[in-house]
Amino acid sequence: MCESHAKSYFVDQEAGLIIFWIGLYIACDLIANVTAGKPVQVGGIIVPAAVFIYTLTFTLVDLINENLGKRGARQVIYTAFACNLLLAGYSQFAIWLPPAPFYRGQEAFAGVLGATPRIVVASLSAYLVSSLIDAEIFAWWRERVGRFKWARVLASNSISTLVDSMVFITMAFYGVLPVIPLIKGQYLVKMGVTVVSIPMIYLVRGRKGKSEK
């Protein structure tokens, strides 16, 4: 394989990997919105079923930030936000459409996809604010500190997931449920998922290093 072909091969391989992470990021975010309606109990803590896959998005956006920079990460965040708006809007449209005469699942269908406007607004607001904060902190650490990839993932996620929990719980449940215990429970679970997902960033950078060699 000549040098130009080798470079082209590795560039295409790297670009394909970045596209994969972007697609996985958006998919996880959409799945989280669909599965958020079911509360589950984990070690005595009540959290939405979506919390596990949703927390993974913070590490995924760090991977994107690592490869495309802060500007690229922000563009992906805005794209995912638009996808979530489309999901919320079309779900309401699908619920509004009259069901076929033989269809008996309209109530269950609406129960799964028909989140209240307050929950939708809280979810989208928390996602946008916390994701942009994550991108800023991750980029700041990389530019100012440079070392310790695990530390910049942990630092950006620890702050952004706290903001996400505070914004979402407060906007969605203030005046209805006790928000402080809910925030604490969600944050503990999110940080647990974050710690488990940290090795992903070393995997991606390792593969990128092989391509450069």
Image (tube, grey):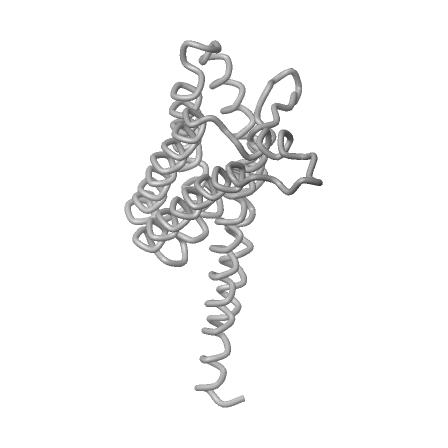
Q: In the picture shown, does residue 28 fall above or below 167?
A: below
Estimate the x, y position of residue 137 in percent, counting from the top left: 33, 40
Residue at the spot 60% in from the left edge and 19% down from the top edge: 46
Estimate the x, y position of residue 9 in percent, counting from the top left: 50, 78
> Is residue 192 shown left or right of residue 85?
right
Residue at the spot 56% in from the left edge and 37% down from the top edge: 34
Residue closest to the eye, 118 or 145: 118
Residue closest to the eye, 76 or 192: 76
Q: In the picture shown, does residue 125 fall above or below 18?
A: above
Look at the image and tell me in which quarter the N terminus lies.
Answer: bottom right
Residue at the spot 29% in from the left edge and 49% down from the top edge: 143
> Is residue 200 shown left or right of residue 164?
right
Estimate the x, y position of residue 37 in percent, counting from the top left: 57, 28
Residue closest to the eye, 206 or 165: 165
Residue at the spot 61% in from the left edge and 30% down from the top edge: 49
Estimate the x, y position of residue 166 in percent, counting from the top left: 40, 22
